Image (cartoon, rainbow, N blue to C red):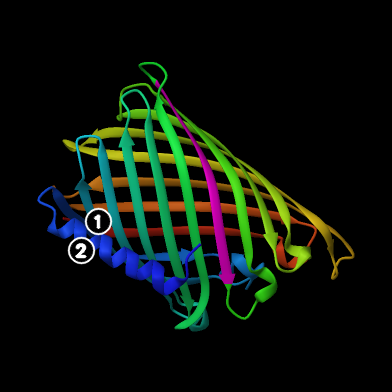
């Protein structure tokens, strides 16, 4: 992939082109909230504090949606998110995400190519740079069934941990079953990922399965949304980890629940909770975590 400056320049050129287009639509969102984490952790480094903390969360998102032609659509996006902990100041995290998504409608089949560049910082210092490129094909195979398949290539660069720098190759398959259109549907998915790191002890193959249920409910004459999600992943590491003198094996289970209630046409309130159980024969990567939070979001 290209270098970071070239990517950012290309992104700005796309934004300029989108803004000058008569068919460009600008939208966005601003959110602020508060959440509690029972076990503050840095997942990318296999480290958890064993202690809980709470923090203020905030985010901003801006999207430029451009119809290049009747069948070609381009969405350019930028988002920023941040969490400021009450106690763990060193783990305050901010994330910048630049995205491009090109969609081509071939009628019964849709082709999409997405690119994301993510920069994360801890305590104001560079921590993680991540790039992801994914071409995909999708379409309805019946009135209620929708399928999507994608290839994923990614690169990550972890500051001060060069051994964890890696490339990823993977494949994703998602199936959607619509009971009542977008008012009630199920999403099941499978993903395979092969990670090749600079330090061989971090190389692994991962298989992940997920299941989501989305139900829109009329409450107090407002259309609210309830979402439940379960995700399971197992990782097989290819070489022995020196600290345990054996090959590492991880099993990761995540569960989440989220409820969104519209206060006005543009302002909504969301409550959410999640539970993660990371099981590993590497002690530092074996921990549990519970997250609960709430936020107010304004969309425009």
Quadrant location of the C terminus in the rendered image = bottom left
Q: Can you tell which quarter of the image residue 81 is in?
A: bottom left
In the rendered view, would you say 17 is above or below 128? Answer: above
The location of residue 238, given as percent across then percent down, is: 80, 55
Bin the neighbour count of mark 1 within 10 Å (Cα to Cα): few under 14, some 14-19, many 20 and up.
some
User: How many numbered marks, from 0 up?
Assistant: 2
Q: Using residue 261 as the reference point, say whether residue 207 is left or right of it.
A: right
Residue 254, above or below 34: above
From where the camera sits, is residue 298 visible?
no
Q: Nearer the viewer, residue 3 or 179?
A: 3
> Could you tell me residue 141's position as x and y percent?
42, 19
What's the magenta region? 145-157
Residue located beneath label 1 in the image:
63
Residue at the extreme right of the image, as rendered: 245
Viewer-proximal residue among 241 and 270: 241
Q: Give the residue number, with chain letter if any, for mark 2.
A: 16
């Amino acid at each position: 992939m290209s270098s970071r400056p070239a990517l950012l320049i290309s992104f700005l050129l796309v934004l300029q082109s989108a803004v000058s287009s008569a068919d460009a639509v600008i939208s966005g969102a601003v959110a602020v909230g508060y959440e509690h984490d029972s076990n503050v952790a840095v997942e990318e480094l296999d480290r958890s504090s064993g202690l809980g903390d709470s923090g203020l969360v905030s985010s901003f998102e801006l999207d430029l949606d451009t119809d290049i032609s009747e069948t070609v659509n381009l969405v350019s996006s930028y988002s920023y998110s941040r969490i400021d902990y009450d106690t763990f100041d060193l783990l305050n995290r901010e994330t910048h995400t630049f995205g491009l998504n090109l969609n081509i409608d071939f009628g019964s089949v849709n082709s999409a190519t997405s690119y994301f560049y993510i920069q994360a910082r801890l305590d104001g210092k560079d921590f993680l740079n991540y790039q992801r490129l994914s071409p995909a094909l999708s379409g309805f195979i019946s009135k209620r069934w929708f399928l999507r398949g994608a290839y994923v290539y990614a690169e990550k660069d972890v500051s001060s941990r060069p051994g964890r720098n890696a490339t990823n190759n993977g494949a994703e398959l998602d199936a959607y079953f619509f009971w009542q259109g977008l008012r009630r549907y199920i999403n099941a998915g499978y993903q395979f990922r092969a990670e090749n790191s600079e330090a061989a002890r971090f190389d692994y193959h991962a298989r992940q399965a997920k299941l989501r249920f989305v139900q829109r409910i009329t409450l107090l004459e407002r259309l609210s949304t309830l979402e439940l999600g379960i995700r399971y992943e197992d990782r097989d590491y290819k070489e022995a980890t020196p600290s345990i003198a054996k090959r590492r094996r991880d099993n990761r289970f995540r569960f989440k629940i989220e409820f969104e209630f519209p206060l006005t046409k543009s302002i909504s309130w969301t409550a959410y909770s999640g539970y993660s159980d990371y099981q590993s024969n590497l002690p530092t990567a074996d921990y549990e975590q519970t997250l609960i939070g709430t936020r107010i979001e304004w969309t425009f």
